[in-house]
Image (tube, rainbow, N blue to C red):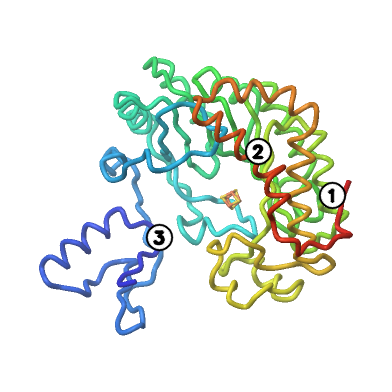
Amino acid sequence: VDYIFIGEADSTMPELVASLESGNKCPDLPGVLANHQGAFTGDSRLNLIKNLDQLPLLELDSFYDLSNYYPPIHVRGRKIINVASTRGCPYQCSFCAAAEVNGRNIRKMGVIRFVDQIQLYVEKGYDSITIYDDTFTIDKNRAVEISKEIINRKLNIAWNCFSRVDCVDYDTLSAMYEAGCYLIMFGCESLNDTTLKKLRKGFNANQCLQGIEIAKRAGLIVSSSFMIGLPGENKNDILNTIRQANNSDLDLAMYPIFEPYPGTPIYQDCQQEGHWVRNKYKNDLMVEQDTTWVPNDVTREDLTELSRYAHRSFYLRPRFIRSFWNIFKELPWERKYRFINAGLDYFLLSKLTRHRAFNKGARFH
Ligand code: SF4
């Protein structure tokens, strides 16, 4: 690694390139660190773009061959791309590193500028967009304005977005649905109030279930992630979340195993409350795709088995199987095939081939 950008590199990247071309390898740029024989020096302040409207419209497909990248299997459409209308998140969830990257102050793109971006991609033949804002409905009026602008311009686009259960209401989500939004993704993370407090999510389990119900009533496919192995949770707490999610209005649920990120408040708690599976993971997160840290009272094998159990119990429910067609029928054939393949692999084949290191007593039926 020769350079590190702290925060957003939209303006500093071209400045660095210009500087390198003129022979200066160590320009003094905000948020840019240069490698001097293994030590990184420079201005380490978080560099953020103040006015997102000043950025040119993005054409990501001029840099990357997007056909090399697969969207999640439940994302609709044949030609798919990601956009963002805000940067930064004012919430303080204790496990989340978003503020370390994009800051706490939310910066919003103008409605017209953002819809111009969507229109550009529609004109290029894209029929599906994921809006990668941390919380697209953080400003509900703005979400409605964007939806109205998409409708006014008759943009035929299917889209999905991320939000929080305490940032939605029926009217806003209905307006989004009318404008082509078909899927909303929440990060409830747990359905235990004590854990939610510890995570500083700012909402409780009841609000989670209400937000999910509102989104469902507005016509959206509703998805949420729940982290397995959070600090302070034992098997019963995890099973309680799984049970409540199974009984909720959710259409899709993800159960990743929790990883503490350095720099987040919860990382400190994790030094005391549990143990690292291997020391190297402390600095190698998201690389191994494996359990990195285990809370007290459960084992690494328990976490793996609980995550598998959670997915099995959610996706093999008669209720999911009945509603599955609504999600499945909208997918192009190649993604239908991947959906089936991934399901078979996860639920059947991997059972035969996966490592047998699990605690044989760890069954949660
Ligand atoms: S989890 Fe979401 S809402 Fe919470 S701080 Fe991170 S980005 Fe913000």
- Say left or right for 173 vs 70: right
Judged from this view, the residue extending furthest toward the front is 352
Sooner in the amino-acid sequence: mark 1 or mark 2: 1
Q: Residue at x 39, y 68 (%)?
A: 45
Crowd class of label 1 (few under 14; some 14 to 19; many from 20; radius 10 Å): some
**Residue type at mark 3?**
Gly
Residue beneath disc 2 = 343
Relative image position of residue 251 (x, y in whole percent):
69, 31
**Residue type at mark 1?**
Leu
Question: Looking at the rendering, which quadrant does residue 317 occupy?
Answer: top right
Q: Residue at x 78, y 53 (%)?
A: 306
Relative image position of residue 288 (x, y in whole percent):
57, 64
Q: Residue at x 35, y 44 (%)?
A: 52
Does residue 327 sit above or below 98 in this rendering?
above
Between label 1 and label 3, give the one nearer the viewer: 1
Residue beneath disc 3 = 7
Measure the alpha-carbon separation of dots 1 and 2: 22 Å
At mark 3, the secondary structure is loop
Sooner in the amino-acid sequence: mark 1 or mark 3: 3
- Say left or right for 355 vs 37: right
Sooner in the amino-acid sequence: mark 3 or mark 2: 3
Crowd class of label 3 (few under 14; some 14 to 19; many from 20; radius 10 Å): many
**Residue type at mark 2?**
Gly
Residue beneath disc 1 = 239
Question: Looking at the rendering, which quadrant does residue 231 occupy?
Answer: bottom right
Front residue (pair 132, 105): 132
- Say left or right for 144 vs 248: left
Relative image position of residue 135 (x, y in whole percent):
55, 41
Between label 1 and label 2, give the one nearer the viewer: 2
Measure the alpha-carbon separation of dots 1 and 3: 38 Å
